[in-house]
Amino acid sequence: MYHLRSLIRQVRAEVLVLPSRVIALVFVIGLLLFPLLTQDPYLLRMLILASLFSIYAASWDLLAGYAGQISLGHALFFGVGAYTTALLGLHLGLHPYLTVPLGAVVATLAGLFVGVPCLRLRRHYLALATLAFPLMLTGIVFMFPNFSGGEGGIWRIGRLASTRVGEYYLIVGVMLVAVFSLWRIAGSRVGLIFHAIREDEVAARALGINIVRYKLLAFAISGFTAGVAGALYAHFARIAGPSNLDLFMSFQPVIWTIFGGAATIYGPVTGVFVLYPLLDSLHVLLPQYRMLLFALLILFILRFMPQGVTTWIRDAIETSCPSCRVRNAATRRACRACGTPLRN
Amino acid sequence: MVADILVNGLVRSGVYAMLAVGFGLVFGVGRVLNLAHTAFYMVASYGIFHFVATGLGTPLAVFLTSLGVIAVGLALYKFFIEPVREMEATVLIATLAVAILLQELLLVFFGSEIRHVPAAFPGYSRIAGVRLGNQEMATLVLAAISLLGTWLVLSRTRLGLAIRAAAQDREVANLMGINVNRVTTIVMALGFLLASLAGAAVAPLLPVEPRMWMHPLVIVLAAVVLGGLGSLKGSVIGAVILAFAEVLVVFLVPGGSYLRTAIALLIMVCVFLVRPEGLFGAGATEER
């Protein structure tokens, strides 16, 4: 009873005061209650894929949006996760609950493997060097078709759960945990250090921050999360193939994150949950013009909201207190933390 | 075999160098990492296909295509890219969206089937006992002329001086009375011109299809950073290295056509391990 009351108090003090957090809460509850309303397999499949790609996009946001290490080869981690779990299942016959974490661990190692040579590279050089890694791995996959499945990929990977609803709750649960953890990491001291590294590496080093350690940490966390997404994706789609590693797969998290708003964690999730269902329904309605409309939409959104959709909406419904930087609903007269008048 | 490698390597070097120089110029002056650069090269190939199919002569087709590509490119740049130019990641996605837009427009107008453009200079000629396709030679001549022309414009004219000044430091160039925005627009047009000439040059040599922009994009990005961002000499040398690496892998390694991109990128990463700023790039301290 005591815990329940303190939970309610927490929710009222920390969540209900900010419109953006209310929206997030409604979204989470809606996502969890969705299968009670309808169990339409098409809709469930769409939401599952959107959840998987949210994990993937949020992992890119931590690495690129916060730590400023813009990676154009994020498909490497996604693909390594997918291939690891698929290969372990195929050659050793291990259970998905074992191979998915192993896939994520191997993707973490891939993150460190990419991170070490990239430590010396800056900005555009880094972006283009990371671009190379998934394409090199694709070459290796094609080299050993008997082991890796070659161009066709690996088929008939084991399911995660016997029913669609079971898969839905598993994957949505993992997504909520992963995104919330990333959000907490991004808001912690580590996240602050990532901000500092992005803004000015030399200044951060002068303040005694171990740049090497934190950059590798960013690569490792991001690789791990993207690996989880890739491994779960392989089990859900039941195939791991070279398309998990291709150029467009690397660009997709960038599109979602920039569209939603970089360096926010909830931005990429919004981006995926807006763009992915939209693209999917355009596929049904206007298959011929789907990518055309998609590209036009992205261009126009970026033209008029260059910081991304969530940043634009957040700045419209919330203001930041000029003296203590706490965020407030735009309707408030005085800051909720320090009482400074917000409008005069 | 050796002659084949040499000829193919030179042709690819020429095409990649044209693309890489245009890309490098646009990046150097406009600070725009234009992922749509090779999409314009693809549009040019389709333009040549269209005009040749309607029965125009090759010179007229090349002229009209270049004009069209420059006009479309500048319109897209002015409306979508220039207002967000200051935000790096946004530019990345906006240019990528432009590339997808162009790809999809071509799909709508021309369909997804692979097109072939008849050679403008059919036949072969023998030079020192080696059989050379006339079309390949024309491509090499076109690449040489356009690269030489670009170099002359940059080194011998007042416009070239303004371009180099703007590439070195936009703010100071602006203070010296150079209209930096106009210079950027001119450089953009020059980049589109080089891309469309490259597209015109490969149209009779390679199959024309709506995904043909991806492979050259990767190679051009690799060539430009391999040579060092902001160094045109570096871009050309990077393009030559990667073109020959690609051709050697395709000719000498069994199943090499799968590996050609991987090897080119491996070379780039290896160069980065030794010189993080590329072969001819400015060091991190000089960079702004």
Image (cartoon, rainbow, N blue to C red):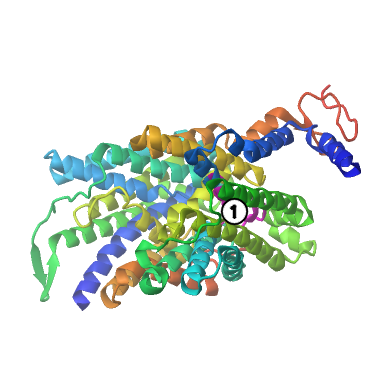
Q: Nearer the viewer, residue A207 or B117?
A: B117
- Please tell me in which quadrant of the rendered image residue B104 appears: top left
Could you tell whether B16 is left or right of A224 in the image? left
Nearest the viewer among B165 and B69 is B69
Residues rendered magenta in the picture: A50-71
Amino acid type shown at disc 1? Trp
Rendered location of residue B258, percent (x, y) = 33, 67
Residue at left 37%, top 73%? A146
- Residue B81 in sight in this render: no
* A221 versus B61 height, above or below: below
Q: Could you say which quadrant of the image residue B11 lies in?
A: bottom left
Residue A248's place in the image compared with A158, above or below, is: above
How many C-alpha atoms fall within 10 Å of the one at disc 1: few (<14), some, or many (≥20)? many
Q: Is residue B63 magenta?
A: no
User: On what subunit does the disc labeled 1 rest?
Assistant: A
Residue A306 seen in the figure: yes
The residue lying at 75 percent from left, 66 percent from top is A210
- Residue A336 spot, x, y in % from top left: 86, 32
Q: Is residue A318 left or right of residue B84?
A: right
Quadrant of the image containing the N terminus of chain A: top right
Q: How many marks?
A: 1
| SS for dot 1 | helix
A32 and A58: which is toward the camera: A32
The one nearer the camera, A222 or B231, is A222
Q: Position of residue A73 (x, y in %)?
A: 51, 59
Residue A171, percent from left and from top: 59, 50
Q: Is residue A70 magenta?
A: yes
What residue would you read off at disc 1? Answer: A60
Q: Is residue B2 above or below residue A14?
A: below
